[in-house]
Image (tube, grey):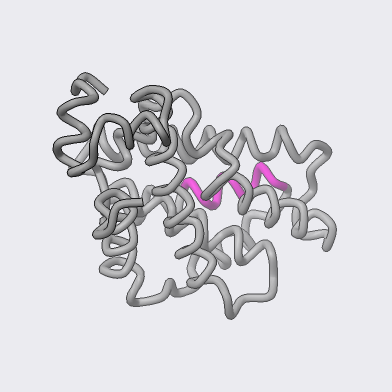
């Protein structure tokens, strides 16, 4: 955000006019880049849950994978944590997918919630707090912390403790680590200008 627009356009190999044809400010560019990164991660998480039919399990796996993202992609994570909205209110990425899964799980009786917006705020706040914890304490076992937080979130959504623990013991796709890094790298540093 501190870089002059001229420096940004030179790094992107585009003219100043092209920049202002697409963005009115650096803040607009930042917001578009953040939305793009969130959408890439969200779309990738959708591919990792494509074989699941239970919306509560889809939510659980997505939360566990999103939590692991903080250690896999610390630079992007710091940007997300320091942005005004990011993953909590964006129309792209994690928030709309979480809303979809929470609503579906509630409709099927897996979650006991009265207000989807409050449930989404709880989930988003928990994810962001978890991210801050993992980035501030690099010695903490991230997988254990993520799964423990996921159990707590599921409990807050009305899932019995033993079921929540069982859901968090389900294996995650083996390829998520390297592939997620690749997805985020492409979103942050696309090979072709848009």
Q: Where the N terminus falls, by quadrant?
A: top left
Q: Residue at left 60%, top 65%?
A: 58
Q: Is residue 170 left or right of residue 54?
A: left
7 magenta-colored: no
Q: Quadrant of residue 160?
A: bottom right
Q: Residue 100 versus residue 146: which sits nearer the camera?
A: 100
Q: Residue 58 versus residue 163: which sits nearer the camera?
A: 58
Q: Residue at left 69%, top 46%?
A: 157
Q: Is residue 79 above or below residue 50?
A: above
Q: Residue 124 versus residue 143: which sits nearer the camera?
A: 124
Q: Is residue 3 above or below residue 34?
A: above
Number of marks in picture? 0
Magenta highlight range: 149-157
Where residue 82 sits: x, y (%)?
A: 36, 26
Q: Quadrant of residue 119?
A: top right
Q: Is residue 108 above or below residue 91?
A: below
Where residue 80 sits: x, y (%)?
A: 38, 35
Q: Residue at left 20%, top 21%?
A: 4
156 magenta-colored: yes
Question: Would you say the magenta stretch is mainly helix, strand or loop?
Answer: helix
Where residue 86 sits: x, y (%)?
A: 47, 34
Q: Residue at left 83%, top 59%?
A: 109
Where residue 19 sits: x, y (%)?
A: 33, 33
Q: Is residue 133 left or right of residue 121?
A: left
């Amino acid at each position: 955000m501190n870089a002059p627009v001229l420096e940004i356009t030179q790094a992107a190999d585009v003219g100043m006019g092209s920049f202002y044809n697409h963005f009115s400010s650096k803040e607009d560019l930042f917001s578009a880049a953040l939305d793009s990164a969130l959408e890439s991660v969200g779309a990738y998480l959708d591919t990792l849950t494509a074989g699941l039919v239970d919306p509560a399990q889809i939510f659980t796996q997505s939360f566990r994978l999103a939590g692991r993202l903080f250690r896999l992609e610390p630079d992007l994570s710091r940007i997300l944590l320091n942005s005004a909205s990011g993953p909590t209110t964006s129309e792209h990425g994690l928030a709309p997918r979480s809303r979809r899964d929470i609503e579906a799980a509630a409709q099927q009786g897996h979650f006991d919630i009265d207000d989807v917006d409050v449930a989404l705020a709880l989930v988003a706040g928990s994810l962001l707090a978890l991210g801050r914890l993992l980035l501030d304490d690099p010695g903490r076992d991230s997988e254990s912390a993520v799964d423990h937080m996921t159990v707590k979130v599921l409990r807050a959504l009305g899932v019995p403790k033993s079921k929540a623990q069982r859901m968090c013991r389900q294996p995650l796709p083996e390829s998520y680590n390297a592939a997620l890094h690749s997805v985020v790298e492409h979103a942050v540093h696309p090979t072709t200008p848009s």
